[in-house]
Image: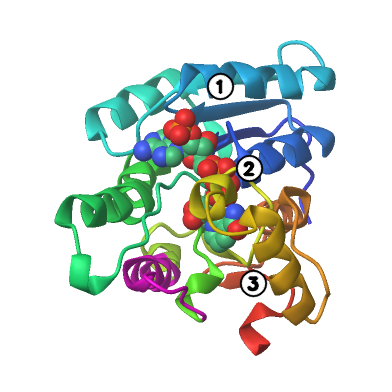
Amino acid sequence: MTKMNQARVVVVGGSSGIGLGVAQAALAAGAAEVVVAGRSTERLAAAEDALAAHGPGRVRAVPLDVTDEKQIRTFFEAVGPFDHLAITAAETRYQALTAFDEGAARTVIESKLLGPVLLAKHAAARIRPGGSITLTAGVASERPLPKGALVAAVNGGLMALGRALALELAPIRVNVVSPGWIDTPVWDRLVGTAVGGKAAAFAAMAARLPVGRIGTPADVAAAFLFLMQNGFTTGTTLHVDGGHQLV
Ligand SMILES: NC(=O)c1ccc[n+]([C@@H]2O[C@H](COP(=O)([O-])OP(=O)(O)OC[C@H]3O[C@@H](n4cnc5c(N)ncnc54)[C@H](OP(=O)(O)O)[C@@H]3O)[C@@H](O)[C@H]2O)c1
């Protein structure tokens, strides 16, 4: 395992949820600097505050929309050489096929699948020897939610993308983390208005899972840190889902 000491880590999607957990874990493991990126400047400022306890000068928050290639190019020019790229940015939409809206579908594909392709394209030349890229898929690939056909397809696509880029970008290591149900703000949007809301949905899922609970951003962040540091792992998908694929 390589040390995180002196590493510069970029977390695209680092202003919330799993990405914020990855930023926390990288700083706790000794990363010299973590750059967090996302669209909302309010969320970025809140993330900077949340990460400030790790000491001055170790966190940079930079606005970025991964659906805009020009912004991506400028972003990496400003970041310069770095070691590890973690991509958790995504805007997911659930919709029945009978009411399929092409615009919503494009939002999912452009943020969660095409975004990582463009990020990898512009990041690769700046990643230092021993560095890595880690993508985020999701258990919806194996266990699709109702109205989740497109999200399932994109998650499956990301696992294939990880394998392909591990060959194409070698010796940069490219891996995928596939989370199960993780308690992040995304769930307020997904089930916040349903009967019983997030608490009821989580209690029902926790009762089904072999581990008996919903995951935390820290559970998933540990997988990202493993994949950044283990120099012999590339082209793989690490499932962090509490056994969700089995039930
Ligand atoms: N939470 C779960 O249970 C779960 C399960 C399986 C898979 N996942 C996957 O894990 C990843 C992270 O999810 P999360 O739960 O941590 O979600 P989250 O809390 O909503 O965080 C998503 C992050 O991505 C950023 N983002 C969204 N669209 C973006 C864009 N176009 N450009 C740049 N940044 C963008 C958001 O900031 P802005 O909105 O300000 O841009 C935010 O920082 C996603 O790929 C998600 O599909 C999550």
Q: Classify residue 36 by image quadrant.
A: top right
User: Which percent across, then down, holds residue 125?
Assistant: 39, 39
* Residue receiving disc 2: 17
Packing grade of label 1 (10 A; few <14, some 14-19, many >=20) is: many
User: Which percent across, then down, holds residue 229?
Assistant: 72, 53
Q: In this view, does 27 lie to the left or right of 41?
A: right
Separation of marks 3 and 2 at Cα, in angstroms: 17 Å
Residue at point 66%, 88% (across, down): 247
Q: Does the residue labelled 1 lie within 8 Å of ligand 1?
A: yes
The kind of secondary structure element at disc 3 is strand
* Residue receiving disc 3: 239
Packing grade of label 3 (10 A; few <14, some 14-19, many >=20) is: some
Mark 1: which amino acid?
Leu
The circle drawn on residue 168 is none
* Residue receiving disc 1: 44
Residue at point 71%, 17% (across, down): 49
* Overall secondary structure of the magenta section: helix
Q: Earlier in the sequence, mark 1 or mark 2?
A: 2
Q: Is mark 2 within 8 Å of ligand 1?
A: yes
Mark 2: which amino acid?
Gly
